Amino acid sequence: MTTFRFIHCADLHIDSPFKGLSAIEPRLTEQLLESTFQAFNNIVDLALCERVDAVIIAGDVYDSADRSLKAQFKFRRGLERLSRAGIPAFIAHGNHDPLDRWSNRLDWPDLVTVFPGDRVEAHPVMKNGETLAHIYGISFPRRDVTENLALLFNREGHPGFAVGVLHANVGGRPGHDPYAPCTVAELHAPGMDYWALGHIHTREVVQADSPAIVYSGNTQARSVREPGPRGCYLVTLAQGAPPEARFIATDAVRFEAETLDVSRQETLDNILRAILARVESLAGEAGGRGLVVRLTLTGRTRVHSEIVSTGGRQGLGEEIQNYFETSDPFVCVDLVVDTRGDYDVRALGQGQDFIADVVTLFQEAAVGKHPEALEKALAPLFADWGGNNLLKDMTASDRAAWIEKAQSLVLDRLVDHR
């Protein structure tokens, strides 16, 4: 039975500067900067170990159009390793690395194919004189491609399996730029067996078969907004069988965003022990990778006032970092405190005093009562605030969350000082 095995990856973002890097300890900067290079090297290692028939990269090899020469040299070294092993690589450029911003030109290994930006090309993958597959693809000629590139694909009767390579927003996914927009139905028409997609950083099997439509996600997360394993898919296409796509983690540094409820912890020592235990568990799950965790403390606790104080928050954070200072691989914890005081808001609202009146006003504001009075009261605070434009897109749930937090800030002071 003829089979075609390949690696599908995308969104390498090699040489990424890492957003919010200033929040990370300076001693970790170099390891973070190297992580995107290491993730690609992990893909190359996987390809060599599995003896795949091809490596497919579906866009955004580099993080920016003005890619550094360092990034290109490191990328080329990985491609040379594949080429020496007889493994072809197929590359479609995306919105972060469009063809019109190719600032530095290098010669690529013979087995590397870079798809053009003005048409879809089909290239065969051969093995022992047999055509295993044809790889169809197109690159972004410029950054802002809003045309439906999927309409340009056509299987054309070529022998072997058909794999389409496209950097696109399929189905109008919210929160993502609408580059090369198309629908799932439009990906059915060209007759592909597998669509290797890029652009969306969260991996997803949009459709498992007929055809398989897959986002591999990015190979290395760049912030805590991209938590969990990142990597590629090891794909096997076989005659008479559905496609098999197995996810393989390739990230060199793992990012996580976790919430820890400390409601049952009555002392700072207990809270510290709970934090260390949770972070150690995450470090174990990271499988020998460096770990960056944003840990948000929630819940009502008796030591809330101590935690939220400037000295308390700083002291707790320093103690956590001291504990993990000698960890190898590294562990970095970004501590966020969102706890509340240990009191019953409902019971306070049922009283006959000033605090009960305050709780009632907050509860009424949360359900939309007195909107004019609320806006009038807040107007002086926001009049000269530089972030005032952000309020235009505030949703009802955002407003309710803000009101709840404001209520807690007020009650923390009133209840603790009655």
Image (cartoon, grey):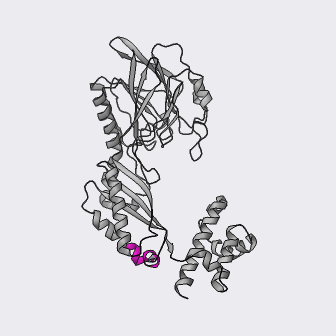
- Residue 11, compared with residue 244, is above or below; it is below
Residue 45 in the image: x percent, y percent? 29, 34
- Residue 180, compared with residue 355, is above or below; it is above
Location of the C terminus (image quadrant) = bottom right
Residue farthest to the top, as pictured: 129
Residue 33 in the image: x percent, y percent? 34, 50
> In the rendered image, which quarter is residue 350 located in?
bottom right
Q: Residue at x 38, y 70 (%)?
A: 271
Nearer to us in this view, 316 or 364: 364
Q: Residue at x 51, y 41 (%)?
A: 200
In this picture, which residue range is highlighted in magenta?
Answer: 304-314
- Residue 383, compared with residue 201, is above or below; it is below
- Residue 23, compared with residue 198, is above or below; it is below
Q: Residue at x 59, y 40 (%)?
A: 178
Nearer to us in this view, 417 or 263: 263
101 in magenta: no
Can I make out residue 23 in this image? yes
306 in magenta: yes
Location of the N terminus (image quadrant) = top left
Image-based side of 287 in relation to 210, left or right = left
Can I make out residue 81 in this image? no
Q: Residue at x 45, y 15 (%)?
A: 160
Residue 266 in the image: x percent, y percent? 41, 75
Q: How many marks?
A: 0
Residue 239 in the image: x percent, y percent? 44, 17
- Magenta-highlighted stretch: main secondary structure? helix
Image-based side of 29 in relation to 91, left or right = left
